[in-house]
Image (cartoon, rainbow, N blue to C red):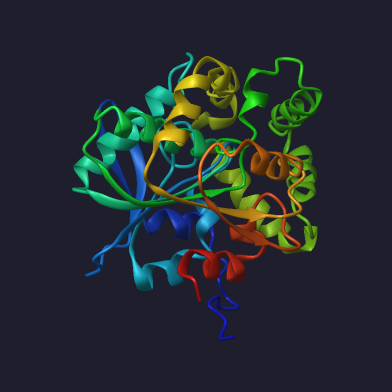
Amino acid sequence: MESLIKDNTFISSLDWRKKGSLIPVYNKNIFTIDTGGNHENCIVILHGYLSSSYDYYKVLPELSKHYRVIVQDLIGFGFSDKPEKKYFTIIDQTDYVLELWKILGLNNVTIISHGYGNLLTTEILARQNHLATNIEIKKIFFCNGDAPVNHYNYLDIHNTFKDVDSEKMISMLTSFGVYKKIMKDYFYDETKITDEELTEMWVQLENDNGRDIINFIYHYVRERKIFWNRWTTALKETENSIELIWGKEDKITHDWLESSKEEKTTNYEICLIEKSGHFPMLEKPQEWLQCVLKK
């Protein structure tokens, strides 16, 4: 099969920033890359926690051949503005996301989300089900994360695995050395993420004092318990087409996928990516694209 990824895909943070622009939304500026083009369909991408739009630098060129692609840094991440030192909620993030899409004139979209971004997508579904947004959703791709699976874990306050994982994520902010070590551990094959890439990701994490602010966003783990009923109901009631694109060897969500099949929370298809961890768009970009584009 013809490769969808070029060998020289690496791009620096500086060059990545040049691809986008800061768009004023309410009282914040959101870094946004809009590939434009004369495409009938639009894909919008919501990244994960301690991450940014840069996660998609390998797959963006091919996606943009088929879709108008909107990829943004959520508030508090990457090159977007940072929140004040106060709790910044999933509800807040969703308000900003939907307003940005309104400014860009988006209507019918396919959503791709990952990790933390999955929670925003689920909140968007809840609003759509209650007719609180006019956005039309063609399809949803949930990538590795806990939003669409194993919902009872949201209520398990004493979930040891989640506590350990939470501590690891917080410790990633300590230094670049710790960040690099833990990030490589999230890959099935750590050679698939280079020190050069991790350096660029760290630069974006630190941008505009981001490392000191980001813990004010981390309280989203509590929101999963607060909004458990709202979000699980949204997934049960939605009529949108949902597909999971999952790195099969993800150490964060490895035991959730199987149990989710027993819950039957919603109808969805699963595209499993073998020998891939938590970041299949970086570790197995060719296979990830094939799941999205069905090639």
Above or below — where is 166 with respect to 251? above
**x, y percentage for residue 18?**
38, 57
Apparent side of residue 249 relative to residue 57 in the rendered image (left or right) = right
Residue visible at 63% across and 53% down?
246
Q: Picture quarter containing residue 166? A: top right
Numbered circles on residues, count:
0
Which residue sits furthest bottom? Answer: 2
**x, y percentage for residue 128?**
30, 34
Apparent side of residue 171 relative to residue 50 in the rendered image (left or right) = right
Q: Quadrant of the N terminus?
A: bottom right
Q: Nearer the viewer, residue 12 or 250?
A: 250
**x, y percentage for residue 225?**
57, 17
Apparent side of residue 168 relative to residue 226 in the rendered image (left or right) = right
Residue visible at 32% across and 29% down?
127
Residue visible at 64% across and 53% down?
279
Apparent side of residue 67 relative to residue 53 in the rendered image (left or right) = left
Q: Picture quarter containing residue 256? A: top right
Q: Which of 144 and 204 is in front in this view?
A: 144
Above or below — where is 63 with respect to 262? below
Q: Picture quarter containing residue 182? A: top right
**x, y percentage for residue 61?**
44, 70
